Amino acid sequence: MVVLLSLLAATAFALGTVLQQKGTLLDDGGAADRAGVGGVGFVVGLLRRPVWLLGGAVTAVGGVLQAIALHRGSLVVVQALATTSLVIALPFGAWLTDQQITPPVVLGACAMVLGIVLFVAVGNPEGGTGNPTAASWWLAGLGSLCLVGVLVWAGRSRTGSRQALLFGAAAGLGFGMASALTKAVTDVVGQGAAAVLGSWELYALLAAGLVGLVLGQSSLRTGALAPAMASTNSVMLLSSVWLGISVFGERFQRGGGHLAVAAAGLVAILAGVALLSRAPVPAPDGSLSGTPS
C-alpha cells in the first residue's frame, strides 16, 4: 500500500509541477525576467493564473497521498519512490511546456528507475522512532537552512539550467524537511485537532513548505524542467536519507551485501539525475537551447 500511495503521489506531483511551470512561463518577458528568486509580486501573480492554481491543486492531492504514505511507511522509502515524479513528468513536459526528450534524458530516466528499485527493494530502510529528540531537529533544521542560503546565493549569479539546478537543489532541501515534518505531524493527528494546531512541527512544516514552494517556482520559471526537477528530487531524496537516519533513526539492511547494493542504487539515481539535468532548455520563442547556460 505504501508503494502504491507513493507512486500515485509521484504522478500527481509530476503533473502538478508541469502545470505550475506552464503557469510560471505565461506572459514571461523573456529569459532576463526569469533570473533570480521570485519575490512577493511573483508569487501573487501566480495566484492569478488558473493553470498554475490547477497545478497547485493537483500537487496538493499528491501531498495528501504522500502524507498517508509517510504515516504508514519509512521516510526514505516514500521519498525514494517520490523521486520517480521526474520520470513521470517528462511526457507531461513534452506535451505542455515544449520539453524535448533526448536519448540522454531517456537513459537518465532508466538509470533513475533502476536505482530506485535497487535502493528500495534491496536496501529496505526500516525501523526508526516516532519521537525524535529536539537536538536532532535543531541540527537538521539549521544545517538545511545554511545550505539553502549558500545555494540561493550561488544561484542568483547564474542563468538558465545552472540556476535551475541551484534553486531546485535549495527547494529540495525545503521539501525534504517538509516531508520529514509531515511524518511527524501525522503521528499526532490521532490526538485531535488541538494537538495538531498546538504542535510546533505544523508551523515548521508550513515554513519549510513555503521555502520549497518559492524556490521551486523560481527554478521552474527558468524554463528548464528536467534540471529543475532533477536537482529538486535528488536533493530531496538525499535530504530524506539524512533526516531518516539522523532524526528518525531509520536503518538499512546490512547483511548479504544489501548495503552495497542500496548504495549502488543511490549512485544510479544520482547518475540518472545528472543525465536528466542536461536536457535542452526551451527558449522563450519555443525553440530549444541545446547547451545548458
Image: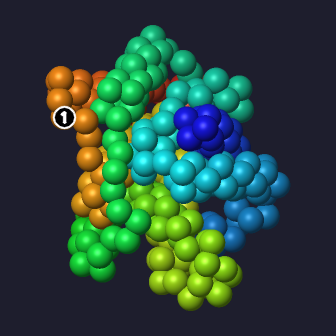
**Element type at marker 1?**
loop
Q: Is residue 200 visible to us here?
A: yes
Q: Which residue is mark 1?
A: 254
Would you say 141 lies left or right of 61 here?
left
Q: Is residue 33 visible?
A: no
Picture residue at 65% right of the left edge, 87% below the top: 194
Tell me which residue sits at (30%, 80%) in the image. Answer: 134
Front residue of this view, candidates 52 and 59: 59
Residue at (35, 62) in percent of width and height: 129
Q: Residue furthest right?
A: 50
Between 67 and 232, the residue placed more toward the observer is 67
Q: Is residue 261 above or below residue 60?
A: above
Amino acid tagged 1: Arg
In the rendered image, residue 64, in percent from the top left (x then y), is placed at 66, 55
Where is residue 278, by image quadrant?
Answer: top left
Which residue: 43% across, 48% down? 74
Q: Position of residue 69 (x, y in %)?
A: 57, 49
Image quarter in which the C terminus is found: top left
